[in-house]
Amino acid sequence: MFDRTALDVALGRKPADAVVRGGRIVNVYTGEILDADVAIAGDKFAVVGDVDEVLGDGTQVIDASGMHVVPGLIDPHVHVEASKMSMTSYAKAVVPHGTTMVFTAFDHIASVLGIGGVRYMLDEAAGLPIRVFNPPPCKVPHTIPPSTLGASVGLEEQLVAFEWPETSGIAEVAFDYILRDDPGILAAIEECERRRLPVHGDGPLVTGRNLAAFMCSGFRDDHESASKEETVEKLRNGLYVLIRESPAARNLEDCIRAITEEGLSPRRASLCTDDVDPTTLLELGHMDHLVRLAISHGIDPVVAVQMATLNAAEALRLDDRLGGIAPGLYADFVLVPDLRDFRAERVFVGGRLVAEGGALAIDVSAPARTDEVMSTFRLSPLDPDQLAFHADLPDGRVRVISMSTPDGLRRIRRDVELEIRGGTVLPDPANDVSYVSVIERFNDTGSRSTAFMSGFGLREGALATSNTPDDENVVCLGADPVSMATAVNRLIELGGGQVVARGHEVLAELALPVAGIMSDLDPPEVVVAERRLTEAAHELGATPERPFTWLMFTTITTLPYYALTDRGFVEHSTLSFMSPLLGPA
């Protein structure tokens, strides 16, 4: 990347602003660990090697003795808003772990505020000690059939975003759109092709001829592999595979076997988090945790670092700016004492110390929030009967489909018999069958639907959240409609958030007033609230380790095999509405 100041330093015409001395550089290009120094000019690396000739009276000397000098870590696929933290709070959480760049679509806030919401997040990020690059959403609504949202994004909005310096391609293009010949998606892909921008894919279980079609559609990368076999096939077809490890999708252990067991080159494999909650960030870490995890499963430490830096940058076509320690790149780096037990001691962004000893070394604060961002929750209070499942059938027994979720991401079919009384089909919490409702919350249209969910083990009470990709409407899981109404109505009062209720009592809550999906609280404060929510959910019988993380994916129609939106129950195989009611037993 051309930089006049770095050029002058490299030629010895000017002294360096800073030099990093005494460290061992992890060279991700050659796979070596080298004893070498680094000179920095402005926010770029200028010289790697002998820096004596560029030392000046004002040159800052950064002592890296006993340290490995590692490129700043990159998360190549993450939804920041899924963390429930604002961009500012998120930076506070991840930068001390050595993450210096994230690639995020901001598609969640796009569902609320459109492309203006994406720009809002990028403007906030510009003042933070982390680089944020953005592929705008491939489309909003992302659900098929479309749910009711606060805003939409299509080619017209993408053309605006394509002029932004942070933009690189379009995000999360589901293969289902290709199968349906979605005209908006195909036009966006063609525009990316014309501009030489990458198309970032979403291909769960896409193999065989479908994978060939996936590649022929111009997709560059995919983060949905869930097994060694899927990873092997995608790598062999030339796809960049972003191996995911998140609370809802612990895929790393299986997918990494494509490298450790099959001996495939790791150069097109990188690591990503996709969706991660604050408790995981506080307890385990961010990309540093994934590096340690990869090493624990047999990956060489230098290769693990490559997977979290250069490989990710190449997948995103950003390796001309970051991903390694080389002249001309941004001077983003981490000092790590022990490469195998990868933990960031000091973190630098643009040559500036931003974190040390696991904490930020600079002060950052969220911007003043506008009414437009803080007043997005428009929903009238609900009565319990509005959340029940009604059917015009006589009293007795009926057969229904209950979405059974084994891992949070998939919802498989479970046929069950339930009692119908007075035209209401009753849940059966003793048999792990709860109600689940999705309620439109942007314009109080009254659009809502109820179906049945299994896999949570909920015996009583209700959980409700407005942090719910792909549409950010309210999702409520409940053993009874009274508890559900209590939880939903408290969300309305909070202006967005997460709530656990039992009967008429609220047991735990977390307000998410920023666009109804995020909080400006410091990460430890969010974690305290999140832990209380989890404890309260477990008290009601919920069995998932992170029940809200599982619940939030209910509305994603592009994941197998069923979903629920405000408009109805969706079958993934046909991407069309159907009734979960099968008929009398």
Image (cartoon, rainbow, N blue to C red):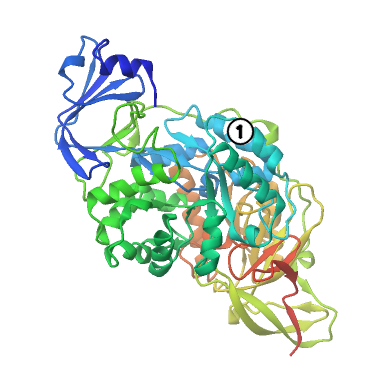
> How dense is the environment of label 1, judged by Cα within 10 Å: few (below 14), some, or many (20 and up)?
many
Of helix, strand and loop, which one carries label 1?
helix
Q: Quadrant of residue 322?
A: top left
Q: Quadrant of residue 372?
A: top right
Find residue 466 and report its horizontal and vertical position in percent.
Answer: 64, 52
Q: Is residue 277 above or below residue 249?
A: above
Find residue 140 and report its horizontal and vertical position in percent.
Answer: 68, 48
**Which quadrant: the N terminus?**
top left
Q: Is residue 120 above or below residue 573?
A: above
Question: Would you name the residue on which mark 1 appears?
Answer: 119
Find residue 81 and report its horizontal and vertical position in percent.
Answer: 55, 45
Classify residue 376 as left or right of residue 394: left
Q: Is residue 150 above or below residue 534?
A: above
Q: Could you say which is closer to the camera, residue 157 or residue 296?
A: 157
Q: Quadrant of residue 551?
A: bottom right
Point 52% across, 48% down: residue: 79
Q: Is residue 509 visible?
A: no
Type of residue at label 1? Answer: Arg
Q: Could you say which is closer to the camera, residue 23 or residue 247?
A: 23
Q: Could you say which is closer to the camera, residue 181 or residue 269?
A: 181
Classify residue 520 as left or right of residue 391: left
Q: Is residue 258 visible?
A: yes
